[in-house]
Each structure stands twice: as C-alpha cells, then as structure tokens.
Amino acid sequence: MDGWMRDLTIWLADYYLLATLLLIVTAGVKRLVRQPAQRMALSRATVAGLVCLAVITAAPGWPRVSLPFATVLSPAHRVAVSPPTIAPGDDAIADLAAPQSSGPDESSAPMPLTDPTADVPAARHTVEHTNNQASAGTAHRITAIMIRCFLVGTALVAIWLAVGVILTMRLRLMAWHAAEPIQSVLGRVLPDQPASTRVMLSNRVNQAVAVGCFAADIILPRRFIEAESRVGLEAALAHECAHIRNGDLRLLALMRCLALVLYAHPLYWAFRRRVQVDQELLADAAAGQCCDTADYAEVLLHWFRTNAADRSRLMTATLGLWERPHSLKRRIAMLLDDGFRVQTDCPTAWRAFGSGLLIAAVFALSFFTLRTTPDSMADEVQVGEPESPVPLAADGNNAAAEESKDAEQADDATAPAAGSAEATSDTKSRDSKYRSAEEAWRAGIAGNSAARRKAFEAALRLASDDAFKIRIYEALRPTYRRLSGVDKMVEACEFIIRHTDSDAKRSLTRRDLVSFMYQRGKLDRLVSRHEGVLKEDSNDRTSLYILSEVYDRARPNPKRAAELLQRMMDLEPDKPLDVSTTAKLAMQLVRQKKYSESAELYEKIAPLDENLAAWHWKEAASAWLKQGANDKALAAAKKATASTPEKRSKLLIHFWHRHLGEVFLATGEFKLAASHLEHAIENTDIEGYLRDCRGLLAEARLKADDGN
C-alpha cells in the first residue's frame, strides 16, 4: 500500500472513530432537549467540532494517546521474526532468492519468502513469518481496495454537490424579480429583514425556496402570484426569511462539504436529518407568528399536496427540498400543540453551555488515536537481528530498559546543535575521556545501558578502521532502534552495507533496515533517499542494493527490481556471475512472466555452486514448464535429480520434491512424479501442503496405473 494511501487510511480511521463518539455525545444530549432552538445551537457546535476534528486528526504534531487496540491498525505494527541462522561457510549465498512455487497451479501452493541457507528451526520460524506476511499482505490489499472505493464515493458526492451548485446558479440566473407589491409584502411582514434579500419568481420550482449562502434570494413559484392566497404568500416569505436569518443556508452548505468525508457514516446522515427537521420547525414557528397557526398548518398541507402532483425529482433531490410525509406530520403537530410553544431564539446561557460542552468533547477526543505513537513504538517487537539482553528488575518490570530509554532521549534533547562551536567542544570533551577507540569500546561493553551509547559513539569517532567501525555500528543498532527518530539507524545500516566484506552480513543488514523503516512507516523516505542518490549516481552500489530489496519484498515491483539487479551485475561485467544476485534477478523475471529468460539464468548459475545446483535446476524446470517448453522442463528436472539432493532444511526439501513432482507429472513421467510427491509429504507437517500434495500424488498414481 502506498504511503499516501496508508496515511489516508489512518486519518480516516481516526476521524471516523472520533466523529462517531462526538455524534453519539451530541445525540444523547439532544434527546434531553425539547426546544429546537437549543438543539440547533448544539448542532452548530457539533458541525464546528467535526471540522476541527478533521483538521486535528491530520495534524502530525498534535499530542496523542494510542488506544489499546491501536497496533491493529498502525502501519508500525509487525510480527516479530528473528533472522534465519546462516550455516558456516554459506556467507556467499545468504542472500539467495526465495523458493517460488511452480507447476500448473501456482495458487495452490503459496511459497514462503525464506532464505535457502536457513537451518530447520529457522525455516519453521520463517513459515510462521510467511503466514503473518501473507495475512498482512491480504489485509493491505483489502484496505487498499476499500480506500479506492471510498475515494470513488467521495468523487460521486462531489459530483452530486457540483450538480446542485450548477442547478442553483441556473435557477437564480433564469429567475426574474418579483413585482413591487410582493417586495412590499416582504417589508411589511419582516421589517428587520436585510435589504439585500430579493424576492424572485421562477417556473422551475414548485415551492418557495431560499438560495445563496451569503447574498440570499427567495425564489417563489410563478403560481404563487396567480393562485396563492395572501396568508400563503406571507407565510412562505416569513418561512424562508427565517432560514436566511438563522444562517441555515450556510450551515447546510458546510454540512454538505463534510459529506465529502462522512458520506459513509450512518450517524452523520441521521444527524443531518435531525438538523433539517429542527431548521424547519424554527422556520415554521417564525411563519406562525405572522398569521394564525391553524391557517399556516392548512397552507403547509396544501403545499405538500400540490408538490406531490407536480414534483421535479432531480431539482428537489439536489437542492434538498424533498418533504417527507412523517416530517410534515411532525411539523403540523408541533404547530397545533397548545401545550408547547416553540422558542425562535436560543438563550445566550444555553448557547454558551452547549458550545462549551462540545468544545470540551472535541478537545478530549482529539488526544485519542488508532495509530501507534512514537512513545509506544519503542515497546513494539522489532524484526531483525536479536538485541543485547537487558536485565530485568526484581519486580519483573523492565526498569533498566526504561532508564536507558529515558537517558537516551534526554541525551538527544540536551545535545547541542551539530556543527556549532559548543557541539565541537562538547564532542572533544567527551572523546578526551578515552585515549583510543579500543578503550572507548571496552567502556561501552562494560558500561550500563545509559552510558553505552555515549561510549560507543566516542569509539566510532576515534576509530579509523572500517572493520572496527562496523563492529561499533552493530553494537549501536539495538540502541538506535529504540530512538524515536530513524536517521541514526539508517546511518548505521548503510555504513555496514557499504563497507562490509561479508555477503551474509550485508544481506541481513539490508533486510533489517528495510523492515525497520517499514515498521516505522518511513519506507517512502528510504526509497526517496536512494532514488535521489541514483539520479545523481546511477551506479551507486549501496542504493542499488537496498532498493532491489525494497522492490523485491516490501514494495513488490518486479520490473524495477529486475532493472536494479541487472545494473548491479553490469557494474562488474568481467566478474563471474554472482549466484545470489543472479538468482534474485531470475526470480524477478519469473514474476514478470519472462519464464524463458529466467530459466536460462537458473541454468547458467546451476553449475556454479554444487550445494545449490539441485535447487537451481529445479527452478529452471519450473520456469520452462510455465513457458510451455515441456522438453526443456523435463531435461532440467532430470539434471536436478542427478545433482546433490537438496538437504539444507526440511522445508526446502519438501518444496524441492514437490516442484519436481509437479514438473514430472506435467511432462508424463508419472512414476517419478509419484516418488517425489511421496518424499514431499514426508518432509512437511503443514496441513495445507499435505492436502495439495496428496491430491497431486493421487493423480500421478492414477495416471501411472492407466499407463501400465
């Protein structure tokens, strides 16, 4: 899932949660209030609160407290997995490509992304990691689909609002000024009405309507001039003037804008309907003061019947003029209720109380979030190499770790700015404690967690040997991992990747860096950093190396990954093929469905490493089979069986036999297929794998019997 989509997902989750709580609070208070004017004061404060929450939840610097289930939705939450152990002597192949499923039905056997050099316990651990990765990947895909659907809905709401604006503008442009007698009626009925309010006539509406957020007009149907009674005309003008005077048009416009985000929220639509009902009740109360309430109730009923016979559905739906029968009954019942008098104005004390209540609710809710805050990030389980053990206090609490964390954060907060004279003198004074890098290194090893970082960083500044600096950075990585920022961790990992001579260490450090940035939600930052480096130096090996891993696992992009891997290989054209890099390139070509190119690469590297020959011949056979070249697939499969059998782990043995069984089954070698599938069943206890292999084995045996 892209960075902007992940940020949008978390913002929407936060906003919908807090908006739900705010709407529930508002609904609960409004149920206790009977006067529409007081409910409208609460409604206006609620709309303002919804706008404020939309801004606050998007503000990155606002202080927040993670909810107990925040890690479920946080992009920083990942399952802990230790790196696979590397067998002695296998450093050169530690970064070999993961095994890929092959055969006619790729979806039937999802393959784990595991290191072929892992031993049996590491392979089992990786299976669990793979299942968690698959679940997380599925969740991300579902979330991405939901966000895209949400954006489509937002676009449709925007179109709906745009149509309303266009129709309103067209309505105002095609209306004409009412005659002076009607204007004088407005001045007589409501002398305090603003002079800018105009009365217009139109053939395109069938009931009186007020339009315009700031410079409002009252538009009457032409039939009002021809057939409407004096009571009806005065009531219509008083009703619409009340809407203008109360600011109902501006409130509705703001609520329609909020619908761009909250259109999928059922409580918001219920709230919106209640607001419209209260607006109509207040407007009816104002109109009822201009004439007898019974006469006005009769006029309302007459208008409803007239509109039922001649109603423009598009216009009424777009402008919000649709009147529901139950709403009309409620309005008339309240008008005729002698025991209850509707107040047209809200008391100042109540308005202040309602606004204060909603402000307090918004302020309190704004501190809660579904995202993981930086404070809780240090408590999350990390993916990568195991950290140094931290002693526990006697009461079972990790007091030492907390003390170390506080000391490190305090050290960061009080450190002078880099490059300043104070920083330079402070650095010299700290380094002067130690006569050499080795002395600082020993002090770091012997010191407690609070002083360890200072000693190691002093050793780093005093060291001149890259190999020694690598040791120091490796010791600092557990500490850097717990910092709220990511720059120190990136610096350490990039130095190790750039200067180490061990392919295994380079590979594990790269995976640790990518998973760390992915957990922190900063993977886009890492990608942008190294893509920028490649724009300036297209042959920067470190950037090519890191991005190839990103586009292989974290942000799968087979085309880009293959391009970067090919550029890495082209940097040293005279050097013999690197087995690990070439295997990764072949795997990316398989993902692009370039099966013949992939198979040729696997066949080139198969003779280069005796320990991996069987695996690479098997991969070549699977690729040829997908290409439809059954003869080449069969030949490669037989070379795989003639090589040293796969024996690195039980899991890899299972897949090696299974894939060969699928190839032999597809190429007509049914007895060989049955033999390999039997061995595949012997080397797994995973129920899904067993079920698939048993089905293939039954098919192979049946075809073998038919051949006999």
Image (cartoon, grey):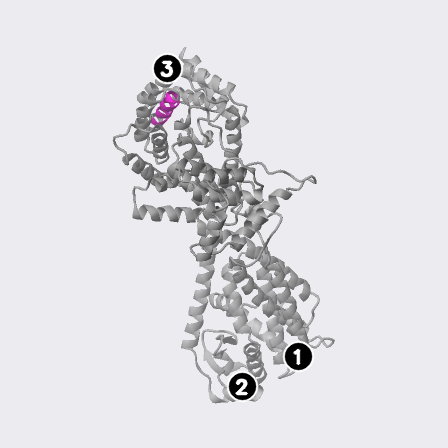
Residue at the spot 51% in from the left edge and 76% down from the top edge: 210
Among numbered discs 1 and 3, the one appearing first in the sequence:
1
Among numbered discs 2 and 1, the one appearing first in the sequence:
2
Q: Is residue 320 visible?
A: no
- Residue under label 3: 642
Of residues 62 and 280, the one drawn nearer to the viewer in this rendering: 62
Q: Amino acid at mark 1?
A: Ala
Q: Amino acid at mark 2?
A: Leu
Residue 186, numbered circle: 2
Q: Position of residue 571 (x, y in %)?
A: 28, 36
- Residue under label 1: 294
Q: Residues within 10 Å of mark 3 (few under 14, many from 20)?
A: few
Outermost residue on the left side: it is 574
Q: Position of residue 363 (x, y in %)?
A: 61, 63
Q: Is residue 615 magenta?
A: yes
Of residues 610 and 396, the one drawn nearer to the viewer in this rendering: 396
Q: Which span of residues is magenta-colored?
A: 612-623
